[in-house]
Image: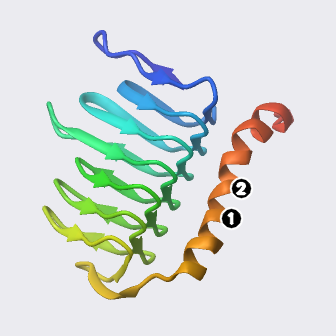
């Protein structure tokens, strides 16, 4: 469901897919090739949210921003099921593991990886190409080219879903 709120109207690329059970509300910009899954909530009621091209916002993700602030999701980002992103910056190609939390003013660098259930605390910076785990997030390693190749393939599946879901998803009553 897509909503205007107090004159704040979402800007959604016609090349994106938003599941009918997702909520996109207010000052939200969604780029080309973005896939937004069931029950995701992207709420720009008093903050701004920008999602770059070819990113995946999986089921039950919540994205929000503080009043007058901004949450930015880069290009080719994967946000795993049930994650929360709040007034943060997620740079290109990052992977946010299922059930993770990235909170106010945190930055997740390019190609960084959050293991499942990781919490990136206020103002924490996750360096590019770094794997982090835990509560709070702690670095555990670096990614390699094999990982990048594998995840580029996985990320392309969600981009293909944008058109496949539009053409092939049918409600059964």
Q: Give the side of residue 165 with respect to residue 53, left or right.
A: right
Total number of numbered discs in the rendering: 2
Residue 158, image x and y in percent? 66, 52
Residue 42 vs 106, above or below: the answer is above
Above or below — where is 108 with respect to 7?
below
The type of colouring in the image is rainbow
Residue that appears at 48% across and 55% down: 77
Q: Are marks 2 and 1 in contact (CB under 8 Å)?
A: yes
Q: Residues within 10 Å of mark 1 (few under 14, many from 20)?
A: few
Considering every residue shown, the one lying at the far bottom of the view is 140
Judged from the image, the secondary structure of the residue bearing numbered disc 1 is helix
Q: Determine the residue located farthest toward the top in the rendered image.
A: 7
> Circle 1 sits on which residue?
153
Hey, which quadrant is residue 111 in on the image? bottom left
With 38 as the anchor, is 9 left or right in this view?
left
- Residue 96 place in picture, x, y as percent: 43, 65
* Viewer-nearest of discs 2 and 1: 1
**Residue at the image point whose x is 40% and y is 73% from the top:** 114
Residue in view at x 25 percent, y 52 percent: 88
Q: Position of residue 90 (x, y in %)?
A: 34, 55
Side of 127 where 94 appears, left or right: right
Tell me which corner region of the image, top left, top right, bottom left or bottom right, holds residue 167. top right
Name the image quarter holding the N terminus.
Answer: top right
* Residue designated by label 2: 157
Vertical arrangement, residue 102 with respect to residue 136, above or below: above
Q: CA distance from mark 2 to mark 1?
A: 7 Å
State the SS at label 2. Answer: helix
């Amino acid at each position: 469901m897509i909503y205007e709120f107090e004159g704040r109207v979402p800007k959604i690329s016609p090349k994106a897919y938003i599941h009918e059970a997702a909520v996109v509300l207010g000052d939200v910009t969604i780029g080309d090739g973005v896939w937004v899954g069931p029950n995701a909530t992207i709420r720009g009621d008093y903050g701004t949210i920008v999602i770059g091209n070819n990113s995946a916002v999986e089921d039950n993700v919540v994205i929000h921003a503080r009043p007058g602030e901004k949450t930015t999701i880069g290009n080719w980002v994967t946000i795993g099921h049930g994650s929360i992103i709040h007034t943060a910056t997620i740079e290109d190609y990052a992977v946010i593991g299922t059930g993770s939390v990235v909170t106010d003013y945190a930055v997740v660098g390019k190609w960084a990886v959050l293991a499942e259930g990781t919490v990136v605390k206020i103002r924490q910076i996750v360096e590019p190409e770094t794997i982090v785990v835990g509560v709070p997030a702690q670095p555990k390693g670096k990614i390699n080219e094999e990982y990048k190749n594998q995840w580029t393939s996985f990320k392309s599946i969600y981009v293909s879903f944008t058109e496949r879901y539009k053409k092939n998803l049918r409600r059964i009553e």
